[in-house]
Image: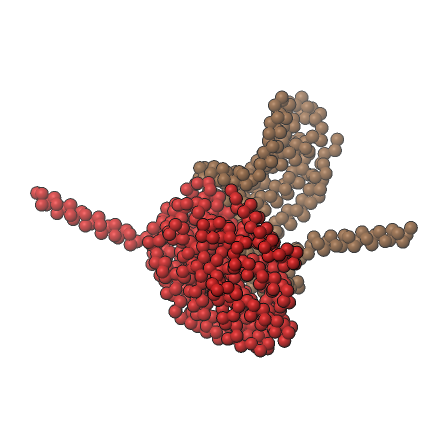
Amino acid sequence: MKVKSYFFRCVQYVFLVTAFVLAVFPFYWMVVGTTNSAVDIIKGKITFGDQLIPNLKKLFADYDVGRIFWNSCKVSILTLIGQLLISSMAAYGFEFFASKARERVYRAVLLTMMVPFAALMIPLFRLIVRFHLLDTHTGLILTSLASVFLIFFFRQSYKSFPKEIIQAARVDGAGEFRIFWSIVAPAMKATYAAAAIYSFMTSWNNYMWPLIVLQSNNQKTMQLFVSSLASAYFPEYGVVMNAILISTLPMIVIFFSLQNYFVRGITGSVKQ
Amino acid sequence: MKRLLSLVLVGLLCVSILGTVGIAAEKKGKLTIWAWDPNFNIPVMAEAKARYQKLNPKVEIEIVEMAKADVEQRLNTVLASGAREGLPDIVLIEDYNAQKYLQAYPGAFVDLTKAINFKEFAAYKTELMTLNRKIYGVPFDSGVSALFYRRDILAEAGYKPEDLYNITWDQLIEIGKKVKAKTGKALLGFDPADGGLIRIMMQSTGEWYFDEQGNPKIVNNEAIREAFKIYKKLMDSGIIKQTSGWNEWVASFNNGDSAAVITGCWIIGSIKAEKSQSGLWGVAPTPRLNLKNSVNYSNLGGSSWYITARSRNRQVAEDFMKTTFAADRDFYQKILVGQGALGSYLPAQDGPAFTEPDPFFGGQKVFADLAAWMREIPPVNYGLFTYEADSALMAVMPDYIAGRIDLDTALQRAAVQLENQIAF
């Protein structure tokens, strides 16, 4: 019996270690890459080198990395705030206001998730041109303010919110805004955190739409920058790796700081 | 009174003519340029910009840097949307894709046939941007191909540089066998899933995947048949180090595992990156196919500049391209030294940078040689679907190499696949 459990534990650990290596190796390789020259990276060197400073110097000398990073942060954070506000309020409406058309409208909204972005791209582009929002961050943020997935996500977690509390609040004379702000939203912290991670991640990694909307060097985001660095007859991989590392940092920070909320938000936040 | 009036009028006319001349001489406006490659096209364009702005300080030029796929994606979206906004004035397009843009978006690019003297550019470069006898671009970098080899390894196997000139692929394979036997090194790093060598072999005969009408020409294409046989021979001969993907392939010669590379001249940057191999390299012309029309000169890759017809500053854009890429010989020396960019502007090619011996290549005048070979590249119309044809052929290559299907079956299958893919 004891031998058997020992054996299972071994298998378990071997599996976990393999999974760990598979998950962490690309990240390790990126970090190692920041310290090596392009030739060494191509040759497959996987130990730390001494090129970190030259790579960083080249990156910061040739490009306004600070500005590009700030562009990405600005777009992602504004999109995040907008998406959370609009989606959570929309979901509140869908969940707590009864009406005949409600489910039909909701289904229509969900259906729009089925339309692939490629089909929307050209009409959306024409729209942006008409609004004179080409090459502006406003054009980028405005078009991504409504997130159908987040509306769905918020509504699902509102379903577990006790209706009695809302009814009680209404009886006590609280307006809907007040109920939303002071009662529902504060109880949903974990849901907001999970939605925030999702929202930040998608807009930070968003590629196609910023590519089409943002036209000048001053406006571009980290993802566009990284991809332009690597498109070359002779790519400077060491420099590229540094840029990639910088572009992953905010994701890591956000994820680790909201990690606990995230898990709770996904598994359901309010207990009845 | 009449006389006075006519005098005044004539005077006014003179002033207005002088005025327009004065305005015409002083260019102003803003040019936006889209390009890729931070170590090549971008600094080259930056050099052109600096030179032009010295003459025309009022012209503002923004070079927008993005990945090649992104340039294509963005160009497609904006052209397809029909919007007037959002296009650059000048855009870099890869040569293999040029016809796709010219034919898919008629009138989108400026016809430069009369504006530029195209006789001064390598003939094969103008051919690929010609549509209905009109020429639409300004030729830029050449991907003239060559056999880059390690002098030390080939000497060890008993070969002199002359032995590599004017040879066929079959002769090269024999050389490779001797190199392998004497030194244990592979002759080439070779990725059987990469169709680049097929394109080199094909262009050396002046053929392409398509006939003059643009219809696929696969099964009865002698150049492709020959190229397929060479691929199989290379795999069977044991003289190659099989690689997968770009990085492994570059590593095969950076590591010193293989004795030679056959590809476009833009590989020089990657070869020179391995500084420990300085002085050990040499360059010879590309091997040719065992066909009558095949020559020892070919090309792989390269790209060119195009001016968009909707540009608000079209005249300035034309003038910019004319005074830099189509006139400035000194500019071409500068970018050759700085970026190793080999332009296809012929008058620049007897300049000092071209005739400079390169110590990395054992003192060989590499660029003078490459420039001479560039003039001999057979012109080819790349048609609309180079990459589609390439992937159709590469899809059947593994089965053909493994001997599971014969050449005819393989090419027929590829032809069917290509037809299906490009049928509208």
The spot of residue B324 in percent (x, y) is 37, 59
Residue at position x 65%, y 28% in the image: A95
Locate residue A178 relative to residue B343 in the image: left or right. Answer: right
**Residue positioned 39% across, 61% down in the render:** B121
- Look at the image and tell me whether residue B51 can be seen: no
Question: On the picture, is B19 further left or further right than A183?
Answer: left
User: Residue B299: horizontal and vertical position, in percent?
Assistant: 48, 61
Q: In x, y percent, where is residue B3?
A: 9, 45
Classify residue B235 by image quadrant: bottom right
Q: Which chain is brown?
A: A
| Extreme residue toward the right, this view | A1
Q: Is residue A219 left or right of residue B156?
A: left
Tell me which residue sits at (61%, 23%) in the image: A101
Looking at the colours in the rendered structure, which chain would you say is drawn in red?
Answer: B
Q: In which quarter of the image is the C terminus of chain A?
A: top right
Q: Nearer the viewer, residue A9 or B151?
A: B151
Quarter of the image holding residue B84? top left
Q: Which of B220 and B242 is in front in this view?
A: B220
Relative vertical location of residue A152 with respect to residue B409 in this rendering, above or below: above
Give the residue drawn at x 61%, y 62%: B232
Residue situated in front as seen by the camera: B13 or A178? B13
Residue with the most extreme left position: B1
